[in-house]
Image: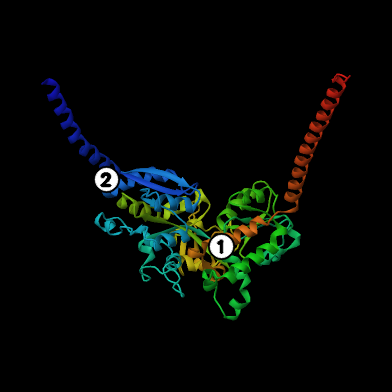
Amino acid sequence: MKKILSFFISALFLLTSVPLSTKAIAQDRAHILKVYNWADYLDLSLIEEFETWYKEQTGETVKVRYSTFDINENMLTQIEVGHEDYDVVCPSEYIIERMLRRGLLQKIDTADFARTHTPNWLRNVAPFVVKKFQQMATNDDDKFNLANPSLRVSDYAVGYMGGTTGFLYNTDFVLPEEVETWAALWNEKFLQKIYVKDAFRDVYSVLIQFAKYDDILSGRTTRDFEASNLSDANIKAVEDILIKARPQIAGWEADFGKERMTQGKAWVNLTWSGDAAWAIDEAAEVGCNLEYVVPQEGTNCWFDGWVIPIYAKNVRAASYWINFLCQSEVAIRNMDETGYVSVIGTPEVLEGMASEEDYPETVDASYYFGDIVIPSVDEETGDTTWIDSKAAHLNHVLYPNIDVIERSILMHDTADRNEAMLEMWSHVKGNNLNWKMLTFILIVTALILLFFIDKKTRQWRKHRRRQALKKRRAPAVS
């Protein structure tokens, strides 16, 4: 009887504890924010500050679980196929576009900000960036076939960092006029001194503008159209350009190109402005003189942005995370930490990034900050100077002049042409056996052949000696 009673008590405990455990887990998950970001792309001290700020704003506690990825597609696979419950992630623009198309995003909850009397800092994003993001949902040839082509992309995605694609070059060996065009890839002077970013979308989007430059200038086509026109003819045109440039290209790099440049081992690097800004600063410390330029034919404006996947469990905290990062002072700290340029276009950021001492030349950055003139007070002397967004002393690598932006495009998802693009990239990279590599392969192959020939020769000689010995030892036949 005691055993039966004990059994029922145990069963009752299990039945009541399972729902309680499930409920407890759900409650714990409501106080966890899973953030998925690129490596080295955040001032990590901000995480704890966000947790404190979130409690002040909402009265709720939250613990950030921060993890990083290094490839857009890997991150997307985890969400789309693995249904990972990341609450907020930071993909590049073409992946944001793909996630929109595939219904993998949910809206950012900005309505909750008003309920907690929290300022909506998403409005700090430069209007120029908002317009660029909106291009993800509209296209002349309707190739994206989004369920709702009139959707506001800003409801689902908010920019974080951005930049351009151009040439980083060593001024000790390269003249400015030699890299003012993408044709620099063909310059025999740069034999085995060029590294190209291993990113086929970025490379395609700039080189197709080079291939179609005459038509663009004459008005027969536009940059935006050609960048999204992934026809066989366009893909072949870019492939031909890269094959012609093969002798000059020392390699394809995902991240080490900037190190090659700072070490003086390369003279030219087709790369992103963020990597260029980092390399220029690093090189200056060791006496290596680097500069960055956007060739005249055009460039792409690339962006990374924050989105909330459909499998997110804590949409509220995710929305506040995005809002928190859009504060001017937070943006400045992230720029100082990462070396990339934030999409926040406020007067505070303009003042924080402007420096006549560091950047004697001026740029017209009114496209980013609006047409404004703001005062700046020197903390030591109390003197007031005025910063004009149309002639601001800014880092031109991070904030290019307006004429550069006017010849830029937004990079789109390759969608159903992805396989054709990858095939083109494979042809170009696979055929890029420079003479050093080819010589190395031939030498190794020859050594391997000589080894096996020598081994076989020794075995044959040994066999002959054994046969001869057997004959000598064999008894004579009477």
Residue 328 locus on image (x, y percent): 42, 56
Q: In this rendering, is residue 62 above or below 132?
A: above
Q: Residue at x 61, y 73 (%)?
A: 212
Residue 379 is marked as none
Circle 1 Cα neighbour tier, 10 Å, few/some/many (<14 / 14–19 / ≥20):
many
Q: In this figure, which residue is indicated by the disc labeled 2?
A: 60
Q: In this figure, which residue is indicated by the disc labeled 1?
A: 421
- Front label number (2 vs 1): 1
Residue 5 vs residue 31, the one in the foreground:
5
Labels 2 and 1: the sequence-earlier one = 2
Say whether residue 210 is visible: yes
Residue 202 locus on image (x, y percent): 56, 61
Is label 1 in a helix, a strand or a loop? helix
Residue 211 locus on image (x, y percent): 63, 71
Circle 2 Cα neighbour tier, 10 Å, few/some/many (<14 / 14–19 / ≥20):
few
Would residue 226 be found to the left or right of residue 268 on screen?
Answer: left
